[in-house]
Image: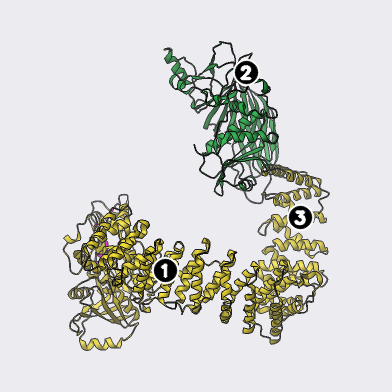
Amino acid sequence: MALSGMRGLSVFISEIRNCQNKEQERLRVDKELGNIRTRFKNEKGLTPYEKKKYVWKMLYIFMLGYDVDFGHMEAVSLISAPKYPEKQVGYLVTSCLLNENHDFLRLAINTVRNDIIGRNETFQCLALTLVGNIGGREFAESLAPDVQKLLISSSCRPLVKKKAALCLLRLVRKNPDVVNVDGWSDRMAQLLDERHVGVLTSSMSLFVSLVSNNHEAYWSCLPKCVKVLERLARNQDVPQEYTYYGIPSPWLQVKTLRALQYFPTIEDPNTRRALFEVLQRVLMGTDVVKNVNKNNASHAVLFEALALVMHLDAEKEMMSQCVALLGKFIAVREPNIRYLGLENMTRMLMVTDVQDIIKRHQAQIITSLKDPDISIRRRALDLLYAMCDTSNAKDIVEELLQYLGTAEFAMREELALKAAILAEKFAPDLSWYVDVILQLIDKAGDFVSDDIWFRVVQFVTNNEDLQPYAALKAREYLDKPAIHETMMKVSAYLLGEYSHLLARRPGCSPKEIFSIIHEKLPTVSTPTISILLSTYAKILMHSQPPDPELQNQIWAIFSKYETSIDAEIQQRAVEYFTLSKKGAALMDILAEMPKFPERESSLIKKAEDTEADTAELSAIKSRAQQQASNALVVTGQQPTNEPPQVTQLGMVKIPNINMENNHVDQEVAQTNGITGDVEPQNADILGDLLSPLAIEGPPGVSGTETLSEDGALALAPVGEQENAIKPMVDIAERFHALCVNDSGVLYEDPYVQIGIKAEWRGHQGRLVLFLGNKTTSSLDAVQAVILPPSHMKLELSSVPEVIPPRSQVQCPLEVVNLRPSRDVAVLDFSYKFGTNLVDNKLRIPAVLNKFFQPITLSAEEFFPQWRSLAAPPLKLQEVVRGVRPMSLGEMANLLNSLRLIVSPGLDPNANNLVASTTFYSESTRSMLCLVRIETDPADRTQLRMTVASGDPTLTLELKEFIKEQLISIPTASKPPVPQQPQPTTQPISSSDPGALLAGLL
Amino acid sequence: MPVAASAIYFLNLRGDVLINRLYRDDVGGNMVDAFRLHIMQTKELGTCPVRQIGGCSFFYMRISNVYIVIVVSSNANVACAFKFVVEAVNLFKSYFGGAFDEDAIRNNFVLIYELLDEIMDFGYPQNLSPEILKLYITQEGVRSPFSSKPTDKPVPNATLQVTGAVGWRREGLAYKKNEVFLDIVESVNLLMSSKGSVLRCDVTGKILMKCFLSGMPDLKLGLNDKIGLEKESELKSRPTKSGKTIELDDVTFHQCVNLTRFNSEKTVSFVPPDGEFELMKYRITEGVNLPFRVLPTIKELGRTRMEVNVKVKSVFGAKMFALGVVIKVPVPKQTAKTSVQVTSGRAKYNASMDCLMWKIRKFPGQTEATLSAEVELISTIVEKKSWTRPPIQMEFQVPMFTASGLRVRFLKVWEKSGYNTVEWVRYITKAGSYEIRC
């Protein structure tokens, strides 16, 4: 560089270098910057020499990491200087200080273009380098033709051509349209004929970029690429200066191989043969040598070749050769190669038929799991995970479990998760699965997420055969002196549910089970205590007739925790205590868990989420798809229960008024849980699993809502207190009453009463909302907005802004039912009283049964219809558990009130009910619906229900609707609103199920 | 008492360790590398004196060209650690004869090691009083003026000194001329808005004393502070003298001051240590006499020009004068050219501090000086946020002036032999952080 002449610059640099600390350096730099600013501002202007000197200083300061935000003008102006030293610094500083988006660059375009089309080779190089480094779209548009001309001109020296190719590459990346595809493909082919390896390498870079955009246009270049490869790999026809450790230009080889991967296939058999010959040579000719650099170069080529082989889906023989090669690599000592070997094997798994060959290396891969290098261990784990299938799952999972004991902490969580997934996916039998997971929890409890043990519980609950085994296993683990908390949770849960199945075994009497669990109580954390309390309640329930001693012990514990500081525990204790005093009723309430709905394993989802490496991700995904059919299916429910309307369910979930909020969520969560839906955001597995755990009898009983998220509601309506104005009626209860009746009060608070009156005709309905102002002043800013579900058309006539004192406004509401659905329309009602803004979301009782027209059928009419609707999805059957116990008569009344007219005597069995109705909607017109309910006189909490209709959606919706009515009357579960007296003091209307249940309690 | 240090390092500005001492083995020997890498070689240096890196806390301070770094790994008493450093530096200074820098450390390795052994045990600070330590660490510093004739002094009973009631003073001192020097040094901290209203103002002051007194004298100091005066008038059953009284906040005394007597009689009485020491420190927040008024006007004319006018008025007595007045008028970072006119002193653009540095060597009382400058800015490519206008900073020293108005009313010396003493009192006010927004 021409620094020798610039004394000021060298002095400055040496001063900077002599600075003893950062602070001194900064002071010196600031001083210099001040000086440069003064110089640049000088009116007299600078001599070219001075300008050059100060721009150099600026560059030096910039390179030291300081902000230089002025002087770009000077730098750019130097580009147009006639002399090389100034031009050079101008180009250099411009490309360092500016990026492609700077406006200043526009000033330079013209100068740069002049240099490019000029005759001076050096200037051409400088200009091309600048454009190649910081050229943007504007450069691309104005300079691309010139650069192309340079690239194909015959008079240019290779030096310029190389730079031109790379410059064009940059421009193409900025704007792919600058290269005219039609004309250029031939020229590209010509360029690939180039003998000069340097130019060829640059052109190949350009080619890779072009082909990646559009491979169609460049078919003609394909044979040329193969020729290049032949020249390099077979003939080794390369000048000495382009070989690297004896390998002919590895960079060019890699680029060519990469370019070939952009073509989908190679059809021409000659080309194909030639290519495969080259690939064969590369695969065979590569070996591991001592020299690291040589290794790196040759392996770069090799792995690119492997990728190409995989891409071309070569013959099996070649594949197995590849795998053999990789197998050799993963046994090598050099960690980099081993890493690449493992990684590529994982990638190879995407190609279907090599799995068996890879399996031969299983032992070696497992050894890699013990490698000192963590990244290799991770790759090995990924590979094992990806290669696992039913045949080797047992070995691999066992190996993983063993490794879990010694693995470092960073990996354990992933390891545990993967082991759990593999065990779930490829379990040869369920008891093995339970064994594995329990072992997993035992060995790595801290790293086992809750999902894993939830999953075990789901499996066990859904597979009756498994229950005694699992309970036994859990019991065995409890004998261990130290036991992990997660293990404690799962054991307690399983034993609570199923310990009665073990009752005859030694050491498994309820009392013994209780004592062994209770022993651990002092060591566990608060959430686990809640589970233990549930377990105690269950044990108590199962020990019938009650053992007084055990009972007293458990009662003592409950009463001890009644004063627990934790609201959840306190509530459970209080409720279990009260419930357990009820004697036999406990049986019904704490009945066995219903089966869980089938759902996608959240573990697999989680694993997919946590995958970071895209390559593995795709491999794992492809494997997951392959093996989806092998995956275990949680049995227990028909797959027809997939409700199609997720969004509609979501609709109801908009938060209702404070009080109803939790409650509706709860209900949605329940319905979701029962119908096997995708999980809504807050009803996660924990919710699903623990909510029935708290109490799994009729979900309407208070226990359901004691679950952690709703704890506040059941205890003290904390949420309510925010809103100064409380509804005076139980809104949920009113809603349920109005589902059955056509007129009544929907909502009432100290200021407003909303009444409703409805008429229904076929699929249409006309409701009138009566908005009444109870106060002596007017209500302002009254707003009523209907949030209709998708299956209904609702039109509310305008609501006046102000309701005058002591008066009532009527608002007609037109309803048209389009399709069968259980979703509910919501009325968003708000008004202002004084300064209080009251906002309520009320469900409108335009529910499914409103569109029923009762019809009574004789046996002759009924049975042909019943038989013609033979199979799902038109006829659905389900065993409903946890039904609120009621007599046959009550049930008939309930059905009748829902306009499902019971036809007595149709069914020969007196314990069964048969009902029929006609459903109206715009899509289905009138549709006959038939329902049959078979009850069990011995167990009132379960029944079998069969629903049939001419429309699959309708059948499903109706079935779910009836089920809801039979099991979930959540209103009664709530504590009464403060102003309201106990529900028991109210007259119990037989048609109001909520009140009915409240009366029972 | 909590631990103050696990290790102490003395580094030069480049980060080389000059000397170090590990007191506890809970920090590794290479911790100082972390300090060098994460603090010294980054812009963090000087921003915060306490930093935590990798579970260890680093307390550091710079004294001339030496960084003193204390490393602790436990929950240490930070204030104690810093106090320890300050006291240790004072100790070294008194051994080396005033200077504490890299060279002084290099020249006194053995002495420093010996002192470091003595002044801290297992991370707990020990006796740091130079008077005491000099009794038994007799190794001389290179230029120690204090023990100029070490041989003629008998080796006194060191243990008696350490445990005795008057630990800070040896018995049997004799001077031909009995003199006491009293320096009252105050520094004014001010933050003023551009409109001239005071946003924050306080004075921190200290009374430094240098005693050359024979025997075991008992001294009594009277100031014009409010509590002392009230108490006095109460004792003498006289009405409080009219005149200015000062309310002192946060008074701290040297350990020699008899606190029981201060609490009961509100008088500062003490047996002074020999030589120089800091008798008391105080703070005043009300009734501060500001020595200077500053009236800035800064106009930004367009994007590339600025006009700056600053007027400084001295408001102390006309007979007094301020020395070493420096006024730093901030200008934007992209300043290119300046032309400055001043009525007195000299002003120059300082690029590394982004300010106009106006220096006035001697500034008489009740006068004023003005600066007017035109500043040209260079245009930059990125549109900058408007200039933040940092405050104008000022440095000065005003001898014989106290911003608090504190005066020494009397200094009584009482000794058995009843010699006469000569008392000298000096006052000086300095600028602390004296800032005026513009």
Residue A829 visible in rendering: no
| Same chain? Circles 3 and 1 | yes
Q: What amino acid is at disc 1?
A: Leu
Expressed as whole percent of the image width and height from the top left, the position of residue A737 reads 23, 67
Name the residue beneath numbered marker 3.
A90
Left/right placement of residue A874 relative to residue A181 reads: left
- Chain rendered green: B
Question: Which segment is the magenta one?
Answer: A725-737
Which chain is home to disc 1?
A
Local SS, label 2: loop
Name the residue beneath numbered marker 1.
A438
Q: Residues within 10 Å of mark 2 (few under 14, many from 20)?
A: few
Residue B48 versus residue B54: which sits nearer the camera? Answer: B54
Which chain is home to disc 2?
B
Local SS, label 1: helix
Residue A626 versus residue A492: which sits nearer the camera? Answer: A492
Residue A903: which quarter of the image?
bottom left
Which chain is home to disc 3?
A
Measured Cα–Cα span from mark 3 to mark 1: 70 Å
